[in-house]
Image (tube, coloured by chain):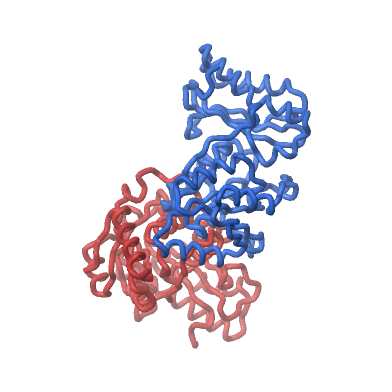
Chain colours: A blue, B red
Amino acid sequence: MPTLFKKIREVKNYITSLKCDGNKSIGFVPTMGYLHEGHRRLIRESKLQNDITIVSIYVNPLQFGPAEDFERYPRDLERDLSVCAEEGVDAVFAPTDEEMYPEKPLVRIEIEGLTDIMEGAFRPGHFSGVCTVVLKLFNIIRPDRAYFGEKDYQQLKVVQRLVKDLSIPVEIVPVPTVRDEDGLALSSRNTYLSPEERQSALALYMSFLLAEKLIRSGNRDPEQLVGAIRDFISRHEHVKRIDYVEIRDEELRPVKEVKEGDRILLAVWVGDTRLIDNWRVGDAQV
Amino acid sequence: MPTLFKKIREVKNYITSLKCDGNKSIGFVPTMGYLHEGHRRLIRESKLQNDITIVSIYVNPLQFGPAEDFERYPRDLERDLSVCAEEGVDAVFAPTDEEMYPEKPLVRIEIEGLTDIMEGAFRPGHFSGVCTVVLKLFNIIRPDRAYFGEKDYQQLKVVQRLVKDLSIPVEIVPVPTVRDEDGLALSSRNTYLSPEERQSALALYMSFLLAEKLIRSGNRDPEQLVGAIRDFISRHEHVKRIDYVEIRDEELRPVKEVKEGDRILLAVWVGDTRLIDNWRVGDAQV
């Protein structure tokens, strides 16, 4: 079983002892828990590259809007600890809100052109909350490498830019999205979906394959492609609303003509569940 | 002579060797150079409390507005190095702009209720630039303690809050303002003043003494006190404009009734020079 820490002071002492004891390299996997196969890949990647792997499990209230699913977000620490044990995680940091934020943080962190688009536009304050908790966790854990899934592609880009702009001494390692056999991107929020909704949610993945097909057949116009994706998705039952569909380059700058390596990113409400997904153009042979 | 580093990579290697070599404690004094007695006090305080003292000398372009004195700001690295040598500084980090910002940072850092008042209101973006460079320098130097003068009181409070909100593993040590014999707070910008302007600039210090006198005589109303200070200062020749005069508590919250420990803070243009100063109520027996 991994060692479980709930106090900042205690996990910091543990880290200090690791640093002094032969300068062990530390891999860090920050999560909101309810671990699935996607998290397992992050952990495995960390174990390959580091002496010690630490997982944090913390549903960060700062990154949820007032009308969002903070209360409802699934939690199961006991099961998460078994997953971590199975994967050979060395330590789990699972602080309480009181421990993380004895006082409400007043800091706001924005990144021009990155936190004000897509997720940032639809979830004001979301990335400021993400940046705050990530900086806090980095300052507590002081990892050599930190692992982020490409499922949250915009978050990955925000964290990479934060690390660059602030000279944070950590290597950010992106790990590809894990999908179910039918193509649905793994997410702790999939647990919200009824079986019928889950079927409709496959439209997200299928829309990427459709876009790939259109691109191969010569359509390189982002507006037309976005239109086709929107049409396709909105034809599915239980699809309540499309927050956005965008095609951007890998650094999330707008593109005029779609090329391999660009990203299709979208957020769609299926029933009462908001799903996000993204796709690297060129990743499917269709 | 202190060792001079101009490259991030090189100073980081030096820090790593210090950390490994018996875990030496590191005191850090971030400055914009043109060192005066105020900086010397910061350095001496650091030398008392740490094994190693590192001074950074960097005029940070990010914290200057487009119409401000970035170009004009006084610079003299050679003299600064002699001052550091006299004070027994171990290492000086003096990076170029290219080294610090190979690319323009896109991050913006604000602290609600702290970066939007006084200096923040009159110098939009100033504190975001300060926070960015301070976080960068902390990530590069990884000090145990960092020394900030109370002369820039609002900056001190911003940095303290940043450290708290982001769990940065550094102790911020405030050091009292150093004044010339006639009461003028030491500042590298005093070099801009003509002898006549310097004489007028004494009005700032004298206005604090006036306020102390009024407070002792029973006037506790911040608005009346601010009015008296404004009147007094504006009667002086060369005083072009008063940006603000405020009385706040030591955490910079507004006050309804002035008490010992509160701060009087002001920014005044004398000729073409913008001076700031502040005063702890109760510090003078008048």
The part of the image, by quadrant, that contains residue B72 is bottom left
B84 relative to B165 in the view: left or right = left
Query: Is residue B51 shown to the viewer in this render?
Result: yes
A62 relative to A26 in the view: left or right = right
- Between residues A37 and B154, which one lies in front from this camera angle? A37
Q: Spot the residue most to the bottom.
A: B285
Residue at image point 65% right, 50% down: A80
Position in image of residue A103 (x %, y %) = 63, 64
Residue at image point 53% right, 62% down: B167
Figure quadrant of the C terminus of chain A? top right
- Between residues B267 and B196, which one lies in front from this camera angle? B267
Position in image of residue A104 (x %, y %) = 64, 60
- Position of residue B108 relative to residue B174, above or below, is above
Position in image of residue A258 (x %, y %) = 50, 21
B50 relative to A173 in the view: left or right = left
Position in image of residue B110 (x %, y %) = 54, 54
- Position of residue B243 relative to residue B226, above or below, is above
- Position of residue B208 relative to residue B81, above or below, is below
Residue at image point 64% right, 22% down: A206
Residue at image point 39% right, 77% down: B49
- Position of residue A132 relative to residue A177, above or below, is below
Figure quadrant of the N terminus of chain A? bottom right
Query: Is residue B192 shown to the viewer in this render?
Result: no
